Image (tube, rainbow, N blue to C red):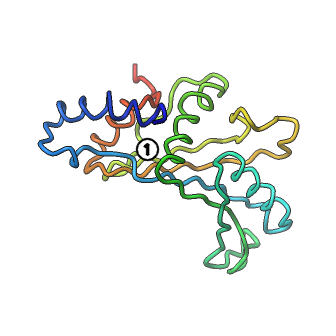
């Protein structure tokens, strides 16, 4: 069992059961999936940027990404319907847990002047969205080989019924939320 799963079963489940007074162990919220995506606006003019982003995302997540396609044309961005504009990966189970453990324990502390992540990015159903401005915070990405920086969007989908439950779940799992002073 990996470190993230062990923390969930030994710390988070008992605390959530006690705090929200769950009567059934299946009521306790859990992380269903993690969606990691990268939009590559430069891919409109040069598709090599999209291939680089896809390779980087595969290296970070350990799973091959799928390219996303523009659904409609936007003249201001020189974007046409059908153009490849980004890449995305959906992680479930052990891969999702390993990725989140890596984000929480290794990647986020490597951000310069890091003071915590925002606690306001929850939707009403307890799902959380986190944006990372640069992919080089991951330790196995060499800064010299990185080329241009790629921003990542990480969406954590939970089985929580409310934003309060989702926030408490992620806080118990070690997510470093910003303290409001």
Q: For this rendering, which residue is in front, 17 or 151?
A: 17
The residue drawn where x is 41% and y is 52% is 157
Q: Position of residue 79 (x, y in %)?
A: 73, 73
Q: Position of residue 9 (x, y in %)?
A: 33, 34
The answer to which quarter of the image holds residue 142 is top right
Q: Position of residue 33 (x, y in %)?
A: 45, 53
Specify whether 60 is left or right of 51.
Answer: left
Does 39 appear above or below 12? below
Does 11 appear above or below 68? above
Q: Position of residue 43 (x, y in %)?
A: 79, 64
- Pick out the residue farthest to the front: 1
The residue drawn where x is 66% and y is 26% is 110
Specify whether 41 is left or right of 161.
Answer: right
Q: Quadrant of the N terminus?
A: top left
* Residue linked to disc 1: 121
The residue drawn where x is 43% and y is 46% is 128
The residue drawn where x is 53% and y is 54% is 91
Specify whether 172 is left or right of 62.
Answer: left
Specify whether 82 is left or right of 27.
Answer: right
Secondary structure beneath label 1: loop
């Amino acid at each position: 069992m990996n470190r993230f799963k062990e923390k969930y079963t030994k710390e988070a489940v008992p605390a959530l059961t006690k705090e929200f007074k769950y009567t059934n162990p299946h009521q306790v919220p859990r992380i269903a999936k993690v969606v990691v995506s990268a939009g590559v606006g430069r891919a409109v003019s040069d598709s090599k940027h999209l291939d680089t982003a896809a390779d980087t995302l595969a290296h970070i997540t350990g799973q091959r990404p799928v390219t996303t396609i523009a659904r409609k044309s936007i003249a201001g961005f020189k974007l046409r319907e059908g153009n490849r504009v980004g890449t995305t990966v959906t992680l479930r189970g052990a891969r999702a847990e390993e990725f989140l453990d890596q984000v929480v324990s290794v990647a986020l502390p490597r951000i310069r002047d890091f003071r915590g992540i925002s606690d306001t990015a929850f939707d009403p159903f307890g799902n959380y969205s986190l944006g990372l401005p640069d992919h080089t915070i991951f330790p196995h990405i060499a800064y010299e080989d990185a080329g241009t920086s790629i921003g990542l969007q990480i969406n954590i989908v939970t089985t929580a019924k409310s934003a309060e439950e989702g926030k408490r779940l992620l806080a118990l799992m070690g997510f470093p939320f910003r303290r409001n002073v």
